[in-house]
Image: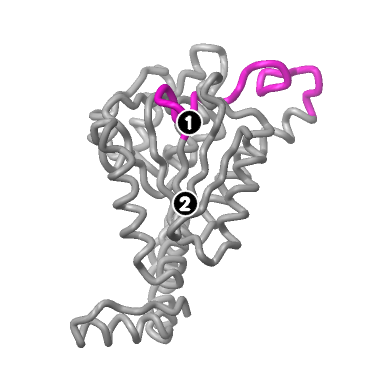
Amino acid sequence: MDVEYEAKASVARITLNRPERRNAMSYGVMQGLRDAMARARTDDDVRVVVLTGAGDKAFCAGADLGGGGIGDTTNAAGAHDSRGLLAALFRDMWSLGKPTIARVRGYALAGGFGLALACDFVIASDDAQFGTPEINVGLWPYMITVPLLRSMPPKKVLELMTTGRRVGAAEAERIGFVNQVVAAAELDATVDELAGQLASKSPVIMRWGRDAFYRVLEMDADDALAYLQSMLTITTLTEDSAEGVAAFAEKRAPEWKGR
């Protein structure tokens, strides 16, 4: 299968499985990713999603430009509608209600770059490379503009889009769109450690807090503060909030109920 799904110990692992194509995204792959995200969303046992690519060459090299791909002009209207799959996938990921981690080894380019930055966290091996090479083939990285703008300063986004240059892992961490860079041999252990930390938190507080984070990105300051004040009051009324406070006072680990 081009998209593989495995759930274990509260973590769903979604793998782009096209190593011979550097895990490039066809329309079928994008729909497969949407299906996998929907599966993770409805599984109450899953608390964290890890997204990665098969092999050691690429996380995802972007859109598949082959026959029937993004470069197809034989059915312009149909192709236009199909290209909305990536936008829909980003919306799925942001509304998932569960934290997402991009495990990046090798290339994360074009749409694959956007896919990685649509995740909440990016853990990269020291051989990872990021970039928006679309300008070099007469295209523009329109569909990934939002995740990039959410992950780094606008002027840096524009620089990468207009030059098409590659960014290594160390620079990516310095710019701020990669959370942590580790040796390739340590990548899985580092991702597993972060996934375990996230999975250990209250699922309901994680969902509400994460939703609030993304919502206020699109709000003005006054509206955001009013919304956040209301969310704080609602959060204090949950069983998990009461349990967390009690566990802190009693110096014990909390037992989350998810409500």
Q: Position of residue 174 (x, y in %)?
A: 23, 35
Residue to which mark 1 is pinned = 54
Task: Residue lying at the far top in this picture: please name it.
Answer: 137
The residue located at (36%, 42%) in the rendering is: 122
Query: Is residue 57 inside the magenta stretch?
Result: yes
Residue to which mark 2 is pinned = 49
Q: Nearer the viewer, mark 1 or mark 2?
A: 1
Q: Count neighbours of disc 1 (C-alpha within 10 A) and say few if under 14, some if 14 to 19, many if 20 or more.
A: many
Label pair 1/2, CB-CB below 8 angstroms: no
Q: Secondary structure at mark 1?
A: loop
Q: In the figure, 158 relative to 232: above or below? A: above
Q: Which residues are magenta?
A: 53-77
- The N terminus sits in image quarter: top right
Q: Secondary structure at mark 2?
A: strand
Secondary structure character of the magenta stretch overall: loop
Q: Count neighbours of disc 2 (C-alpha within 10 A) and say few if under 14, some if 14 to 19, many if 20 or more.
A: many
- Looking at the rendered structure, the kind of residue marked 2 is Val
